[in-house]
Image: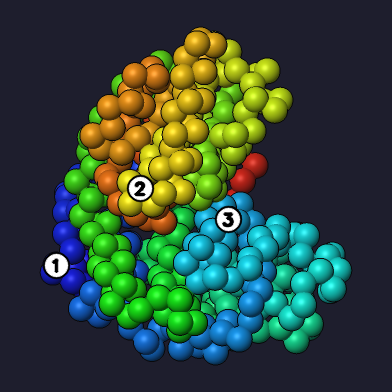
Amino acid sequence: MPIPNKDVPVLKTARQFPHAMLREIYEQPQALSDTLDHYTRGGRLSREPMLAAHSALLGHERIVVAASGSSRHAGLAGEIMLEDIAGLAVDVEYASEYCYRSTHTLHNPAVIVISQSGETADTLAALREAHSRGLQTAAITNRANSSMATEARASLPVCAGPEKAIPATKSFTGQLLVLYLLSLSLAHQRGRMTLNVAEALCGEARELPGLIEKALPSWEQQIQQLAKSYREANAFLFLGRGIHYAIAREGALKLKESSIIHAEGYPAGELKHGPNALVGPETPLVVLATHDRNDRDSVLRYSKVIQLLKDMRQQGASVFALANEGDKDVPQYSQHCVFVPKCSEYLLPICEVVPLQMFAYQIAILHGRNVDQPRNLVKAVVRE
């Protein structure tokens, strides 16, 4: 496939991958690059791809996001992006629950549905319920000709290409990127961000494909080795604060569906409110300890995570942590530490979920699982 933008390096390899999931993890630089090419031109946000979304969403102060599975986790991250960047109030619903919620819970919200296939039964039902209530809608899907993309008032495509493995990888990071770009565009249109700032942040996003491409081989090698230390674990607890809680949830889901091992994602501050009783030799912690030094809230959250790591070390917990490149503190308080590139708070989730996908893959392989087609699961749940 030709590279759409010559300024964005993407992975070039003739490698033969043993599984679709691993190949699709490695395809993420290209998928992100293609998605950026759809929404940006010359480092700037393109107006045309967002016009329908502006028509559907502008004028609303409240947004409901309806999604299931990994797409809902993208929605949880998008909730924070849309609230912090664009100044909107956002409520994230399970798509399967949306049709049964009172019509009076929110006054005249716009509705965003998120689905990899665009055909997920519960999410499609939520979209149609929103239309029956007379609400404006937008759909984020990986198939531009899907039912949701064609029925929603606005379509925001993810340009990840076909995804064969049941565990979502490149479609998920693509969803995060679309939500980020949508947040920037709405922030500018709502007068909360100047065009220069929006374009600077957009330019930073264009660096992501190259950063992830460069890190992927070392992530694979490092995680392949450290995964052996967790082969006997019976369960995992994934912890994150703020926007990183959504990625903790996604990391846990990836591990759960790929390896058939129990895993749960929690806000890091909730560990001592019950889940800590589970922590022991057979239940290690996976802690997202990244931060953005230019964001005071992010730095504060990071300080809280460092204190938790210190406490867990005294408790004797086994910890696998993610940290920023160059971090000197996190490795002191964790048995294993994988570094991710430095970037802004709202782009870090895209970087940090990739090694968690790789971790899920490597644990599954150690247990002899069929990572592309885990038992009892299908790629798109088209029947309720």
Q: Amino acid at mark 3?
A: Leu
Q: Name the image colouring.
A: rainbow
Task: Kindly state the secondary structure of the residue where label 2 is placed.
Answer: loop
Tell me if label 3 and label 1 are in contact, CB under 8 Å. no
Q: Is residue 111 left or right of residue 55?
A: right
Mark before the other along the chain sequence, 1 or 2: 1
Q: Nearer the viewer, residue 306 or 15?
A: 306
| Label 2 sits on residue | 292
CA separation in Å, label 3 and label 1: 31 Å
Residue 359 in the image, given as x and y percentages of width and height: 41, 33
Mark 3, residue position: 76
Q: Which picture quadrant has residue 332?
A: top left
Name the residue rendered at 31%, 67% in the picture: 201
- Mark 1, residues whose alpha carbon is within 10 Å: few (<14), some, or many (≥20)? few
Q: Which mark is residue 194?
A: none
Q: Amino acid at mark 2?
A: Asp
Q: Amino acid at mark 1?
A: Asp
Q: Which numbered dot is residue 7?
A: 1
Residue 314 drawn above or below residue 218: above
Q: Earlier in the sequence, mark 3 or mark 1?
A: 1
Which residue is depicted at the point 66% across and 60% down? Answer: 92
Element type at marker 3?
helix
Q: Residues within 10 Å of mark 3 (few under 14, many from 20)?
A: many
* On screen, residue 1 above or below 41: above
Q: Are marks 2 and 3 in contact (CB under 8 Å)?
A: no
Q: Measuring from the top left, give residue 35's x and y in whole percent.
A: 34, 69
Instruction: Assign a secondary structure to mark 1.
Output: loop
Q: Which of these two is toward me, 165 or 66?
A: 66
